[in-house]
Amino acid sequence: MPSTVEARLAELGIALPEPPPPAGNYLPYVLSGTTLWVSGQISAGPDGPIVGKLGADMSVGDGAAAARSSALWLLAQVRAAAGGDLDRLRQVVKLVGFVNSTPDFTDQPRVINGASDFLVELLGDAGRHARSAVSAASLPFGVAVEIEGVFDLS
């Protein structure tokens, strides 16, 4: 029988991707007690990384969609850390979102809302979290968004 979170993902027509291996000398996540720290997850879809620079060649809506994709990768890492059981996720504690943007772009919070809104839609109150949304002059592979997260597991 699928978990409650997995059933909700299915209702939304979403299949989580398989988490990628780290791209360097770091861990994709660290579980300390019940606190899970997930390394930054880049915006990517079935065709590869979602690249672009907000304020230059991407709209806020496109950026929010990229942030939503990063949230899917975060959840994939949470599922791996939780031994495949997303129902162990008690709370999204904090997200830190990095937005590849021009110096004059100021809508980073609206971009990262793509991840925040999705997590609340999926998890309800357990998806509400503290958050930072900051600009970056560039991100790995030219991606539009990278998000790291802190989660509480049972």
Image (cartoon, rainbow, N blue to C red):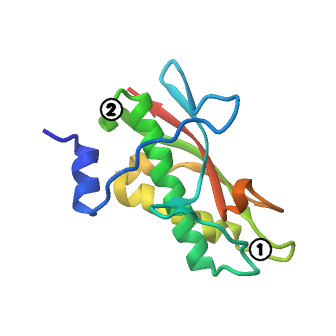
Q: Which residue is mark 2?
A: 84
In the image, taking residue 44 as reference, residue 79 lies left or right, namely: left
Q: Earlier in the sequence, mark 1 or mark 2?
A: 2
Q: Quadrant of the N terminus?
A: top left
Q: Name the kind of residue labelled 2 in the image.
A: Gly
Q: Is residue 27 above or below residue 7?
A: above
For mark 2, give the secondary structure. Answer: loop
Q: Measured from the top left, where is residue 4 in percent x and y?
A: 23, 44
- Quadrant in which the C terminus appears: top left
Give the percent coordinates (x, y) of residue 99: 71, 62
Kindly identify the residue that appears in the image at 50 percent across and 62 percent down: 68
Q: Position of residue 40 (x, y in %)?
A: 63, 44
From this viewpoint, is residue 148 visible?
A: yes
The residue under label 1 is which amino acid type? Thr
Task: Farthest residue to the left: give it.
Answer: 1
The correct choice, above or below, for 36 with respect to 117 in the image is above
Residue sitting at 65 percent across and 60 percent down? 145
User: Which residue is the site of mark 1?
Assistant: 106
Q: Residue furthest right?
A: 103
Dividing the picture into quadrants, the one containing residue 11 is bottom left
Q: Nearer the viewer, residue 134 or 130?
A: 134
Please indicate whether residue 105 sits to the left or right of residue 31 in the image: right
Q: Secondary structure at mark 1?
A: loop
Classify residue 86 by image quadrant: top left
Q: In 3D space, how far apart are the residues under numbered discs 1 and 2 (Cα atoms)?
A: 38 Å
